[in-house]
Image: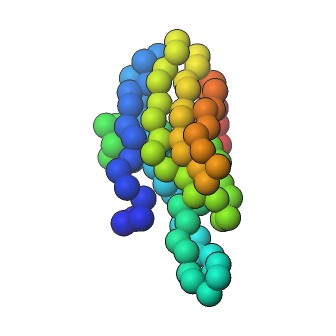
Amino acid sequence: MPYAGLPTVRRIPSTGDLLFIWIGERSDLEEGGKKLARRCALTTAISKDEGKTFLHQRNIVRDPKNDYGYQCIEFIDNNLALVAYHTNDGLHLARIGIDWFYEK
């Protein structure tokens, strides 16, 4: 996905699995007669085999009218991750339990 930029990849401390966070979708909106591309979903997936396959793909946020990017993650302990990202209205911080990344 050329519009997605680079994914953020971190190893989950409690499991050793790789967590990928990337811009998973794009939408095109018209505004003032111009077509504007939006990076409209911040998506995660887990890899248990060093990036060969991915499981549990989920969206942290998704909105076709918004624009997401510049994501980063920090693990606070074995049960909690902080994910920061940019949107149209500034920076946001999500507190996400590690178990959430493994849910379907």
Position above or below: 99 against 56: above
- The residue closer to the viewer here, 78 or 69, is 69
Please report the residue visible at 43 percent of the width from the left and 18 percent of the height from the top: 13
Whether residue 77 is visible, yes or no, is yes
- The residue closer to the viewer here, 70 or 61, is 70
Please report the residue visible at 52 percent of the width from the left and 12 percent of the height from the top: 77
x then y, percent, for residue 57: 55, 47
x then y, percent, for residue 34: 57, 83
Please report the residue visible at 53 percent of the width from the left and 41 percent of the height from the top: 85
Position above or below: 24 against 97: below
Q: Which image quarter: residue 36?
A: bottom right
Please give left or right for residue 17 compared with residue 60 in the image.
left
Q: Which image quarter: residue 50?
A: top left
Please report the residue visible at 61 percent of the width from the left and 54 percent of the height from the top: 88
In which quadrant will I find the C terminus? Answer: top right
Position above or below: 38 against 15: below
Please give left or right for residue 29 compared with residue 17 in the image.
right
In which quadrant will I find the N terminus? Answer: bottom left
x then y, percent, for residue 5: 37, 55
Residue furthest top as drawn:
77
- The residue closer to the viewer here, 39 or 19, is 39
Q: Which image quarter: residue 92?
A: top right
x then y, percent, for residue 81: 55, 24
